[in-house]
Amino acid sequence: MNRVATALGLTLALAAGARAASASTVGLSPLLPNHPAIVADRATCRTPNVPAAIARPGLLIFPSIAAQLGLTGTTKVKVDVDASGELRAAAVFETSGIPSFDAAALEAARDTRYSAEVSDCDHVGGSYIFEVEFAQ
């Protein structure tokens, strides 16, 4: 049976019997210039500038064998989000050096739902770094 917990807005599951371990996202950081915008009605725009964000955290599973071995690491995943907040692509940007961590971080990035950046009242897509820390 798995235990489920939340850390820094990202849900994670830990295998029962494993040592205390956690995995969390550090944040969503812009990587590349923005993609084409979805133009908004500026007359009704209340908040003209809002950074891209995680709208619904994905499930992040700390690999049980890594927890048993006491492994730790950080994986950075590049995510491309379009102007509607849909994930268009995800790939490991910086490996932790532990394949099971990289796979878990990539799966969590794909399972996560995003909200697009708002720039001058327009929704814009962009590329971001989704960073996951695996700690004991």
Image: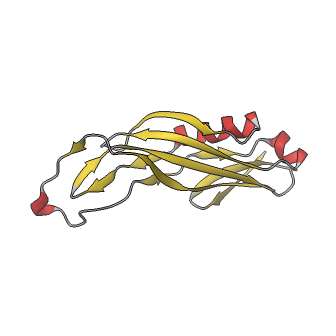
Q: Residue at x 75, y 48 (%)?
A: 73
* Colour approach in the figure: secondary structure
Q: Nearer the viewer, residue 6 or 117?
A: 117
Which residue, as the protein is rendered here, is positioned at the far bottom?
46
Q: Image quadrant for the C terminus?
A: bottom right
Q: Image quadrant for the N terminus?
A: top right
Q: Residue at x 30, y 43 (%)?
A: 83
Asked whether, in this view, residue 59 is left or right of residue 61, the answer is left
Dividing the picture into quarters, in which one does residue 97 lie? top right
Which residue, as the protein is rendered here, is positioned at the far left?
43
Could you tell me residue 105's position as x and y percent?
Answer: 63, 42
Q: Residue at x 64, y 59 (%)?
A: 6
Asked whether, in this view, residue 104 is left or right of residue 43, the answer is right
Total labels drawn = 0
Could you tell me residue 90's position as x and y percent?
Answer: 51, 35
Q: Nearer the viewer, residue 51 or 93?
A: 93
Could you tell me residue 22's position as x and y percent?
Answer: 74, 56
Asked whether, in this view, residue 36 is left or right of residue 26, the answer is left
- In the picture shown, does residue 135 fall above or below 75? below
Could you tell me residue 120's position as x and y percent?
Answer: 22, 58
- In the picture shown, does residue 82 fall above or below 9? above
